[in-house]
Amino acid sequence: MLEFSIILLTGGISLLFLMLYEARRNVVKIEEVRLPHFPEHMQPISLFFISDIHKREISDDIIEEVKGKTDLVIIGGDLLEKGVPLSRVERNLDKLLILGNVYFVWGNNDYEGNTTDVKQLFKKKGIIEIINSSVKVPLSNGMMNIIGVDDASTQRADYPMALEQVSPEEFNLLVSHDPRLMNQVRKEDGIDFMISGHTHGGQIRLFGWGMYKKGRLETLPETTLLVSNGYGTTAVPLRLGAPAETHLLLIDRFRK
């Protein structure tokens, strides 16, 4: 009986350390995204995507790995949550600004902070908010629309409004914190690529099962979709089967 108890205790401690390790990983997933309607005249785009930072401070190792390799940065919501000091948010923004221009879409937990202070910080740092609208981003030999939709889980999303200034014939990147916005996307909207977070990949998955799907890159009839596991955690600082991640996305045309 004592030996069995020791085995259980050892296994429990090992599992706890694994869950802490997966929650604190500093991984940049380099992913090639081949899109059928990527403009032929445009050079490939390099994009750094991070979502669901929550209480974490971005590792310097991530910044060093990505520095000089990306055209721009997108934060896909949940930059913070209740109790995160503004000073930590500022440090994280300063690190991301080393990489390039930073674009931000709001997530549900962002609204737990003092939004007035956060918006003032964005203005001070030159962070570009996209709230149910779009911005045109000039790139090498071309232009990309970044379409930002506010958080759907807090009933702030307005997808039709976000599309008002874009054309389906242009190159369109849709950013929504909550991937359930995918339910509103139609093929005729001309969304070439959609990126989201929010789900944490289920955060803690038991025997492969989680409350949400694990983060993935998939081709759907309406568009190509990336859902990130995210960088931070919520509720408990643990992960299992859905390790923390950020993304360096290399976007180019699909060639047969």
Image: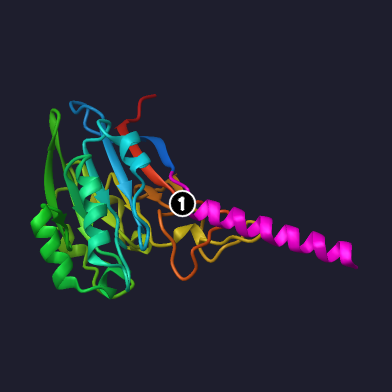
Quadrant (top left/top right/bottom left/bottom right) for the N terminus: bottom right
Q: Is residue 90 left or right of residue 65?
A: left
Q: Which residues are magenta?
A: 1-26
Asked whether residue 167 appears in the rendered view, the answer is: yes
Q: Is residue 93 above or below residue 27?
A: below
x and y percentages locating residue 143 in the rendered image: 13, 37
Magenta span: helix, strand or loop, mainly? Answer: helix
Q: Is residue 159 above or below residue 61?
A: below
Q: Secondary structure at mark 1?
A: loop
Q: Which residue is mark 1?
A: 244
Quadrant of res 224: top left
x and y percentages locating residue 41 in the rendered image: 18, 26
Quadrant (top left/top right/bottom left/bottom right) for the C terminus: top left
Residue 95 falls within the magenta-colored stretch: no
Mark 1, Cα crowd under 10 Å, few <14 / some 14-19 / many 20+, is many
Q: Nearer the viewer, residue 97 or 160?
A: 97
x and y percentages locating residue 122 in the rendered image: 14, 59
Image point (21%, 36%), residue name = 71
x and y percentages locating residue 68 in the rendered image: 25, 31
What's the residue type where badge 1 is placed?
Answer: Ala
Residue 5 falls within the magenta-colored stretch: yes
Image point (25%, 46%), residue name = 95
Q: Nearer the viewer, residue 53 or 44?
A: 53
Asked whether residue 242 appears in the rendered view, the answer is: no
Image point (28%, 75%), residue name = 112
